[in-house]
Image: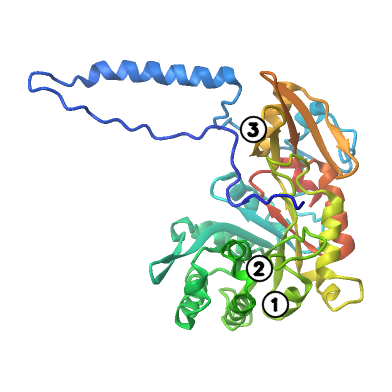
Amino acid sequence: MPPRRRDRRRPRDPSPETSRASTSAASSSSGSRFRPALLAPLLLLLLLLILAALHFSGRLSLPRPQAPPQRTRLSVHERGLVRRDVSASEILAEHATVSENRSRRHFRNPVLAYVTPWNSKGYDMAKLYSTKFTHISPVWYDLKSDGNKLVLEGQHNFDAKWVSELQSNGSLVLPRVVLEAFPGVVLMKKKLRDKAIDLIVNECRDKGYDGVVLESWSRWAVYGVLDDSELRNRALQFVKHLGKTLHLTSSNLSTHHHLKLIYVVPAPRMKELNNQEFRPEDLLQLADSVDGFSLMTYDFSGPQNPGPSAPLSWIQYSLKTLLAAKGSASHGHSHMIFLGINFYGNDFLLSKGDGGNAITGRDFIYLLDKYKPSLQWDEKSSEHFFVYSDKGLRHAVFYPTLMSLSLRLDEAQDWGTGLSIWEIGQGLDYFFDVL
């Protein structure tokens, strides 16, 4: 059975989100008066009780102040931290100490870094380590249907100063656009197809971007587009048309540089590829129209089937399947692949039914500090994990380590692919040393 894919657009934080309290005044008789002064102490008492309950439950994870990373002359490799027999105490002691040489690149191929508004640390990491990233993709836009019209949402996320600073450091900025619009509107009506492309291209030109990262394949799979041969062909033609239009448009850098398109594709999961899989022939059909493929080799496991996030054997299978045999036509396009690397992890519930949450580096450190678990190395997946119990319930936590990341970077290097990191606001500080 193929593992179940979960949407990586907004990983759920195990911490409770702050919600706005709403109050409504009840109708009173003409003789009664509302006294706000009496209500304030009651609300304060209620808030304190809620915070106390969350604290004692161990799940209160309000933003904790983070000390600035400490600097050292030595890299994580030189400090001997990239190994299988790693301990919780070592990670707690070392994760915030990074090499002072931020410009040194260990991984020489292109690196695409995703940044999300809901993990704002990524904005700072993008600037701090910009020399390690050839491409940076802020997750800002959704192209949606509004009746018979199309609307590009997300313009409010644009940060001109941040984009300019990254570009001045040599990184290309390509915001992600998710094609949420109803396929019957975008694919079947030429006028609206052209409108969708115009909205994307014009936004790039107006904001000074270097292109876009487009995500649409998973949405088309949900709508059944990929099971219909005519619609599937129209979908591929849409991507090709967008790519060619971007390539004809000059970028903000100069008239000699044109806008780029990176296309997000799922990693193969089935031995016999079905219509919903992105296949080698699809790659060949799009290769002349796009500048790269962001391959989602993560989210292998989920709450219904707890386990590793991205087994190395599955990554190898995905590359072999998508690029086919060495010497084939598709294998020559390995340089176009941005191999997906996760900087997030998962905390799975193993008792009393299925469940689990995505966790960030901050959550991972919190769990290590609270439970002092023993980390285990899974040879089959080449990932670390640990098990802990809370209130009689057993949990399994899978989160990247320097060793698991290093092995995946080696795999990408061997294949000649780049990297795509989802996403840099979720990782530990010393992860950037291996890039």
The residue where tag 1 is placed is 286
Amino acid type assigned to the residue bearing label 3 in the image: Ala
The secondary element bearing badge 1 is classed as helix
**Res 240 → quadrant:** bottom right
**Res 74 → quadrant:** top right
> Residue visible at 87% across and 44% down?
382
Vertical side of 259 occupied by 431: above or below? above
| Closer mark to the observer between disc 3 and disc 1 | 1
The secondary element bearing badge 3 is classed as loop
Q: Residues within 10 Å of mark 3 (few under 14, many from 20)?
A: few
Nearer the N terminus, badge 1 or badge 2? 2
User: Left or right of 330: which side holds 140?
Assistant: left
The residue where tag 2 is placed is 263
Q: Residue 101 appears at what percent x and percent y?
A: 77, 48
Q: Answer whether residue 416 is visible to the viewer in this image.
A: no
Amino acid type assigned to the residue bearing label 2 in the image: Tyr
The secondary element bearing badge 2 is classed as strand
